[in-house]
Amino acid sequence: MGAGAANAALVFVGSWQVDQGPGWSSGPLAYTGQEAAALLFGGNAGDYVISTNGQNAGDVNYSAWYSVIGVSDGFVFAQDYSNKTGGKYYDQNLGYECCGVEYKDTNAASAYVNDNAIGSRYTNYAFRDDGLGPVGAIPEPATWALMIGGFGMAGATVRRRKAALA
């Protein structure tokens, strides 16, 4: 998705540095960017859009910074990128390949762990949809038809109940 009208409803809710998470040697859970946002700001992972480009909704890139176990530095992957040891961990005890960049796509990754992505350079920015949609959005004709049909059905149900009670 690009910037502009598609992001008009996004509201910045907060940010975090990848290294603010638990220490890697404790074998913590691994988080996608969206899962980390839900952990830190509440709600569900799907409620969030993540960016590495700052607090401006127009600059959202749907990506997050991640630390990868056994690989120096941090890496940008999709906001929902998931590579977890055993399906849920960022864990050295279950094994990983060390120590070259060639393992960045195979080793466990997390957007919230104190390991290789250290410092403010590796900040993720979380946004939520305010539910209003793009400014000036007008429902499509098919949406209007469904809404009118739904109101008609609701009215018919109320009439039947009133008639049954009379």
Image: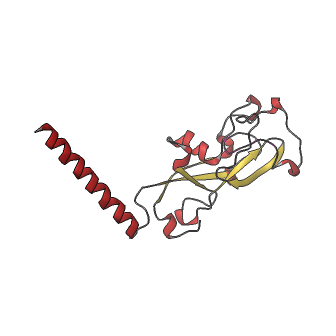
x then y, percent, for residue 37: 57, 45
Residue, x 88% and y 40% (percent of image)? 97
What count of labels does the image hold?
A: 0
Q: Which residues are magenta?
A: 107-112
Q: Is residue 111 magenta?
A: yes
x then y, percent, for residue 77: 71, 54
Residue nearest the viewer, comparing 23 with 62: 62
Q: Is residue 138 visible?
A: no
**Which image quadrant is residue 32 in?**
top right
Q: Is residue 65 above or below residue 88?
A: below
Residue, x 18% and y 48% (percent of image)? 159
Q: Is residue 117 above or below residue 89?
A: below
Q: Is residue 112 visible?
A: yes
Q: Is residue 2 magenta?
A: no
Tell whether 115 sits left or right of 2. right
x then y, percent, for residue 127: 52, 54
Tell whether 17 sits left or right of 24. left
Q: Quadrant of the C terminus?
A: top left
Magenta stretch, overall SS: loop
Q: Quadrant of the N terminus?
A: bottom right
Most extreme residue toward the left, as rendered? 166
x then y, percent, for residue 98: 89, 41
Residue nearest the viewer, comparing 29 with 56: 29
Asked which colour scheme the image uses, the reply is secondary structure
